Image: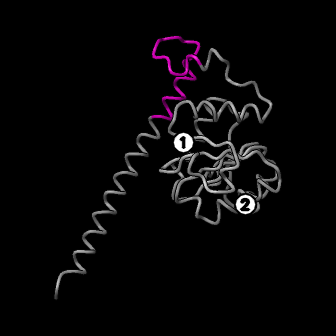
Amino acid sequence: MMSQIFISFIHEEEEYAAAVKRFIGKVLGKAAEPFLASDKAQIPAGEIWLDRIKEQLRQAQVMVLMLSPRSVKKAWVNFEAGAAWIREIKVIPVCFNGMTKNKLPKPYSSYQGLNLFEAEDQFYLVSSIAAHLGMLPPTAAWHDNWFDTGKNLEFTSARSAYQFLQSDLEVISNVAKMMAIDNEHQRRDKARTLKTPS
């Protein structure tokens, strides 16, 4: 089944893209499930991977562009974003891991972007996708209860989706911090080794 939402990401940051995919699906439902090239359920064995990506780009109406300081320098993300631009697909820059919407380079800064780790922008993401796809957006009442810590059962699923994304992103953020610390230790050890006389 072809999706109307295409998530563009680099494989090193797949966990973030997968968390966003799950979040969009939980909030907007199965009809709005995004395409994620790393999802084996969406590209069965035996398919030609590049052909499937090309076909998904032909069908997409919205591209969720996962932008970090690392991904904006990668050819693949720029390649997919260029395809979206030519096809006049709505592009939503989603900034994370040190990239913010006010730091976006051109041409990405021309688009209305958002910061993934800001709760208001998470709501803005799903509301914008709903608007672009002609779906009913989450209601004003739903939004008002988005941050509510009360027990309003009417909004349990929305709150669960928000908490789901938050917990996923907290774990991912902690892993990323640990990896950065480990990389720094390895860099220092290597520098010390190089300075040590034989």
Q: Residues within 10 Å of mark 2 (few under 14, many from 20)?
A: few
Residue under the image location 65 percent in, 17 percent down: 140
- Give x and y (percent) for residue 70: 52, 60
> Is residue 125 magenta-colored?
no
- Give x and y (percent) for residue 144: 58, 17
The local secondary structure at tag 2 comes to loop
- Give x and y (percent) for residue 1: 76, 44
The C terminus is located in which quarter? bottom left
- Residue type at the position of mark 1: Ala
- Residue type at the position of mark 2: Glu
Left or right, residue 131 beside residue 183: right
> Is residue 164 magenta-colored?
yes
Image: magenta residue range: 144-166
- Give x and y (percent) for residue 68: 54, 53
Counting residues from the N terminus, which is met first, the one under dot 2 or under dot 1?
1
**Residue occupied by mark 1:** 19
Residue 43 visible within the image:
yes
Residue under the image location 54 percent in, 47 percent down: 100
Q: Quadrant of residue 112?
A: top right
* Residue placed furthest toward the bottom: 198
Residue 77 higher or lower than 98, as above or below: below
Question: Which is more toward the observer, 164 or 174?
Answer: 174
Left or right, residue 15 beside residue 89: left
Q: Residues within 10 Å of mark 1 (few under 14, many from 20)?
A: some
**Residue occupied by mark 2:** 47
